Amino acid sequence: MDGLLLLSLTILMPAIFGVISYLLPGYDLKKYAVVLCALMLSAASLLVLYSGPNHITIGSINVSGAAVSISSIITILDFLLLLIFLYFGIRDKEYKVMALAMLQAIPLVYLEFIMPASQSAASTFEIDDLSIVMCLIVSLIGSLILIYSIGYMKGDKNVSSFFLLMMLFLGDMNALIFTNDLSWLIFFWEVTTLCSFLLIRHYRDEISIKASDRALWMNLLGGVGLVIGIVLVEEFYGTRFLTDLLNAHATLPGALSFLPTAALVLPFAFLAFGAFTKSALMPFNSWLTGAMVAPTPVSALLHSSTMVNAGVYMLIRIAPFIVGSMLSSVIAIVGGFSFMFCALLAVSQTDSKRILAYSTISYLGLIALCAGINTGLALTAAVALLVFHAVSKGMLFMCVGEITHLIDSRNIEKMEGLITKAPLVAIITVVGLISLMAPPFGVFVGKWLALQSVSSFKGISISLLDIFFIIFGSIFSVFYYSKWTGKLLASGPAEVEKGQRHNWYMEIPLLILLGGIFVSVALTSLFFTNLINLQPVYGIQPSQFVIGQAIQSAIGSFSPLMFLVIFLVIIIVPIVIIRVPKASVTPTYSCGTGSEPELGGGYFEGLIGESMMLRYLDLIGILLLVAIFLAVII
Amino acid sequence: MTQIWEEPIVYTYVIPAILLLLSPLIGGLLTGVDRRATARLQNRRGPPIIQPFYDVFKLFGKEDKIVNKTYLVFGVAYLLTVILSTALLVFHYDLLVITFIFGLSFIFLVLAGYSVRSQFSYVGSNRELLQMLTYEPILLLVVILIRLASGSFQMDAIYKVGPLLYSLPLALAAIFLILPIKFRKSPFDISAAHQEIAQGPMTEYSGRYLGIVETAHFFETFFILWFIGLFYVQNWIVRLGLMLIAYVFSIVVDNATARLRVDQMFKQVSIAGLALVGLNLVYILIMGRWIA
Amino acid sequence: MSSFTELSRKKSPWVIHVGTGGCNGCDLEILSCLTPRFDVSRFGVYSTGNPKHADVMLCVGPVTLKYKEIITNLYNQMPDPKVVMAVGTCASTGGIYQGCYGTCGSLDQVVPVDVYVPGCNVRPEAIIDGLVLALDILNEKERKILEEKKNKASGVA
């Protein structure tokens, strides 16, 4: 398939539809535009999958006869973005935003104007296996969330700007994952910051504006790190194209030659810093938990499946260049630290969206941990977790949105007994929650591969901490997921189910994603063999440890499909066989009093609540960030 | 001339299948022995050894009294998952997967306790989750130590290296520390604290479904003891002796101690267990008894 | 198989011990049955506090008015086949509380009683004797239930 066609379908088409839906009057017409865009975007991503890896170079576009280079367009738009951020900073009187926007301009000016341009024959857009996987995640899940938001945002005031921003974001996200030129990547990165900022402040009340400002300055801080990193990449390697970096040699430029040889990975330290802010790992977690004031489709799309994945995507991209270095181990520690302690914080929460936010940061930390461990098995685990987590988490956020519409509350204490009031949504939520903690689902496959790679002992190092992080983090996850699942399922004796109102715009995407969870687990071995391609530096390809339907590495084996079938049998056979005769229904044992108990509690606010833990955790997080840069210099 | 039990097809398929079929009987008999021994220690006579089987068959003969369908489904799923993990254990599958699937069975029990609106089940499930928080890290760390000592998570590798008891004595001690939690005995029988919260997650079960949960306990007993037996697979007499020592240990500790609070259990077992596992790790690193 | 189930029913009576008021003297005698001196657990008796797990309800004391509803709830939550034992004179006939305004009289005013064990206090040996009588009644009741089920099934069909 023609690469240019695919690129314009996945990048430009959503943006154009966004503008179209902004201009169309009336909610019904907008609905059709959004549905059409969603269908075409899904089809486009499947076409990308079908046509496989590709290189496309677009140097310039023809505007009324004159060739305008895209690089210059992007440069102009870059500075325009920074001006927009500066404007918002001045308007909201946020000094951090103003300072960071101006700070980011400095290395950007250096990058674009002062630095000698490097010549390279590399393509500007590169479609490889990792990009195809990310494109599938962004496009398919994004399309389903667009359809979902038609049902969710009905009756909202600012619907036009909402759809415009969502679809613009989808196109931009696709551009981010396909681009090969790092200076274009920073532009697409900052557009996601802009979209996230504008979408978080959708409701325009004071809490939303504060939360969006916080998200803005943290992401801008990451942007500064990213730009500095790109400048250093070009200084050290002489090129700014990712595909060139694999074969290029790094040299320390004259100005920095006082640093030891290990400092060759310094650019990647800055890129990792940018990735940490985007993925809201510790200590930057507060912007993501604050961003939960946004409407639920925003949380589902940006803050669980796609935008925050851009950060860990960046980590997976830079992983081949830092194999075996101390920086890689420290990235693993930051990821593991986020995994364990955000899971612990989630135990104390009662707001369902906050629980999901902490859970997202936690699993992104796990992906960062796998990327930091940096062996073939661990990177396979990272990519697998990327996919499985995005599907489950997107679905869970959408479920929470629908539950909010049904019971007008986000508190999980109010969701008690939901299985009798709204059985379809409750069952989908329960399956989603179980898929994030239990074997044989995808997240478990990722954790199992991660545990396998950390258990190979290479010497006494801080990597031993990784084992503790994975073990404790996964147990804390079981804690808060089972509590929530149990609350949803709690019901007294045979309560009558009233007719449930169905909002099909919201429920069909849920059902499709539910099927997607099972299909993606069943196709795991196919996914590993065909869609995960590791760089030669790892010495192993995932296809080497997939035998038949089982994943068989040198030290362990597991067959996702077989266990999925067994799991379904274990659950479905009792559901079908057990009958509850009407005559045998009795109330629960409450010492014979016949009174209905009031249940609740078990959140341990005093021990592990946010107010108790975050002081220490933020401190340790900042120390870890300092450690990243020290790890390069020492 | 190889003996019949050294034939590959016999020891790969037939003996494990027989073990799996016998496992509930073995588990039940061990439970009965436990009740009899406890009674003797208290200067009583105690029920006959096959009392657990009388209990289970009586329960299967009772009529149903049910609250809702959800907790029954999870109760049956709990039994099926325990059977699955026992089957994987005797058929020599990947040890890490086995541990996680064993943990899945407890997740089902916890969900069963939550899915019926009863205060006793609710508190019982909360406590069961805290118990899981206590023993699961130690169990997983011991499995990782086994992998370091034998070179692989596959159980066949355990048969190829020397007895694990020589490399991992402190890990075995850590497993002994969490034995009372798994067997639901004093001092850690907190989730089914009879005098405090009726029967914990199993309060609302009755009749056939209670029989199913009791049968699952038999399988669990067998699973845990068989896991301990992995520490000396070379000689079957020593293996059985090790399992016997573990069981006698749990009975003696049960009779000698009183129940602890949940936070006391968590602090004491976590600190002691992690210390033992850490010391064992240092030991195998120093002695070089690890395989990368 | 069904004869083994019947044997098991006789060998494993699980007991719920309910005190409905009164002087608690018979309560103490029931508890002393569990002690090594009388050791009722050698008959497989297990004192569970949960009606859903129990076969035999050992009920003590005249049923005070507050307890009437509770006893009925507990009785209804016990799965069939079940046996109710009125332990002590107060439970059997009202005892020294006969005619009091605060009681319902005897236990059989509230739930159907199968075995009466008089005594004030009732002796542990008498309690064990009553239990042994109750075991046969359990099997009889289950046979009746199964017969009723068969009749209903064939009557409907």
Image: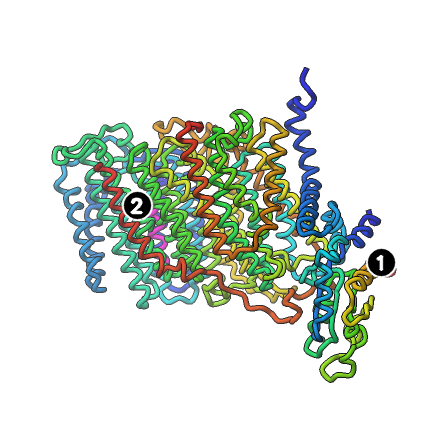
Going by the image, does A32 lie left or right of B25?
A: left
Asked whether residue B220 appears in the rendered view, the answer is yes
Tell me the element at label 2: helix
Where is mark 2, residue-wise?
Answer: A275
- Rendered position, A360 above or below B98: below
Q: Which amino acid does label 1 sit on?
A: Asp
Tell me the element at label 1: helix
Q: What stretch is highlighted in magenta?
A: A162-173
Depth check: give the residue in front, B9 or B178.
B178
Q: Is the magenta stretch mostly helix, strand or loop?
A: helix
Going by the image, does A127 lie left or right of B248?
A: left
Depth check: give the residue in front, A575 or C126.
C126
Crowd band around label 2 with a 10 angstrom C-alpha radius: few (<14), some (14–19), many (20+):
many
Going by the image, does A79 lie left or right of C34?
A: left
Question: Where residue A493 sits: x, y (%)?
Answer: 65, 64
Quadrant of the image containing the N terminus of chain A: top left
Spatial CA span between label 1 and label 2: 75 Å
Q: What residue type is labelled 2?
A: Ala
- Rendered position, C33 above or below B20: below
Tag 1, which chain? Answer: C
Q: Residue B242 carries which label?
A: none
In this view, the residue farthest toward the top is B1
Depth check: give the residue in front, C23 or A486.
C23
Depth check: give the residue in front, A556 or B264.
B264
Q: Which residue is drawn at 71% across and 78% down?
A: C64
Where is mark 1, residue-wise?
Answer: C136
Asked whether residue A61 appears in the rendered view, the answer is no
Question: Where residue A265 sits: x, y (%)?
Answer: 24, 35
Question: Where residue B290 sits: x, y (%)?
Answer: 44, 29
Question: Where residue A229 sits: x, y (%)?
Answer: 22, 41
